Image: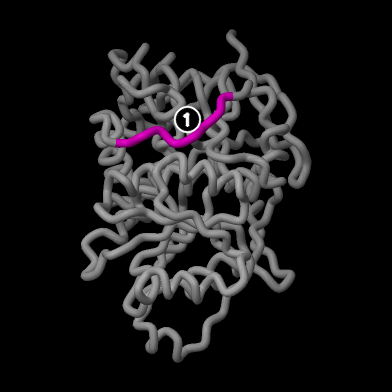
Amino acid sequence: MALMRRQSLVKFDAPLCETIVDTPKPQGTEVLVRIERCGLCHSDLHIQDGYADLGGGKRLDTTRGMTLPFTLGHEIAGVVEDVGPDASKDLIGGKKAVFPWIGCGQCRDCRNGDENLCLKPRFVGVNIDGGFASHVLVPDAKYLLDYDPLPVNLAATLMCSGVTAYGALKRLVDRPRQRNLLLIGLGGVGMMGLSFAQAMFKQNVSVADLNPAARETALENGAAVAYDPTEPEIGRRIVKENEGGFDAIVDFAGNDKSMAFAVSALARGGKIVVSGLMGGNFSLPMVQWAYKRMTIEGFMVGTLAEAHELMALARAGKIKPAPMREEPMGDVQNWIDELRAGKVVGRVVLRN
């Protein structure tokens, strides 16, 4: 029997290591995908750590229900190698991206098409084994998306950083005022957001990031202005330069400092979509909510329908590829360390 290689989490808060097992045989409607590319996401770091930072020394335990060894990785694209008896054999050989945000299929949210909100999820690389491997089992062919003629690395990253950035930006479309837009945090998701925003909005897109290299890359990729959030009096400068501030902001970092910066840059009547998971705690005087007439919405990953919308946009050539680099799958731990140290601009994609 063929063997499957995996970069496995064998202990929380410890490096991944290679494990080798028999390649699984798909059952029922399952589909076996031979993985060609898998993107590295910041949330992979939280799963490896076994917790998310709640601020004030508090942690959210993310280890419950997880059995080790476990395979991380949820931005997957590859080729269908085998199918279960209840799936069509015509799928074999097809180039597919894998939608990873799979629910139980039975609850109210799943029936409404919001599988990403399911309380009993089967998220690939989060709840069931994922893409830092040679193969992955997908529960059903409906979670496979055709991606031709896109490059395989772009197809993979659309499934998490892509659909997260797209969904977050969608929540700012059709608001009463849309004079300007600010994206905070230029990691893999933020750079995707910059690419998509230029296709989804008419106005110029401004960005903010602590990293000078990220700001420079954003300007090279279409950002109108790049702000350093640590600059003294930066909030006042932004309010002055932008006629009262920004009407629409996406916080792709999601920590206390990024949110404080977002609120300082927000115009009255504006909206912030929080899509980052860096962690920490944020508080705001209650009168500020009413005084600024602000809206703050949390958002994490999109629906299968939104993934199809995004894939159609990309396949139609309406989205510029965000910065990314390909590295060998066996080096994934090295790139996890680099990402943790803040040394990665754009997206790292692992290849088999």
Q: Position of residue 97 (x, y in %)?
A: 39, 28
Looking at the image, residue 234 sits to the left or right of residue 249; the answer is: right
Residue at 39% over, 88% down: 291
Residue 267 falls in image quadrant: bottom left
Residue at 33% over, 54% down: 204
Q: Position of residue 229 (x, y in %)?
A: 57, 64
Per the image, label 1 sits on a secondary structure element best described as: strand
On the rendered image, what quadrant is the N terminus found in?
top right
Residue at 64% over, 25% down: 6
Secondary structure that dominates the magenta span: loop
Assess disc 1: are there few (<14), some (14-19) or many (≥20) residues with their C-alpha within 10 Å of its C-alpha.
many
Residue 134 falls in image quadrant: top right
Q: Nearer the viewer, residue 257 or 5?
A: 257
Looking at the image, residue 290 sits to the left or right of residue 331; the answer is: left
Q: Is residue 317 visible?
A: yes
Relative to 139, is 84 above or below? above
Q: Nearer the viewer, residue 183 or 352?
A: 183
On the rendered image, what quadrant is the C terminus found in?
top right
Relative to 115, is 236 above or below? below
Q: Position of residue 21 (x, y in %)?
A: 65, 20
Q: Which contiguous range is marked in magenta?
A: 319-326
Q: Nearer the viewer, residue 233 or 30?
A: 233
> Exactly how many numbered labels are in the figure?
1
Looking at the image, residue 89 sits to the left or right of residue 236; the answer is: left
**Can you identify the residue that label 1 sits on?**
76
Looking at the image, residue 202 sits to the left or right of residue 85; the answer is: left
Residue 308 falls in image quadrant: top left
Q: Is residue 41 magenta?
A: no
Residue at 64% over, 58% down: 52
The amino acid beneath tag 1 is: Ile
Q: Is residue 103 visible?
A: no
Q: Position of residue 189 (x, y in %)?
A: 48, 46
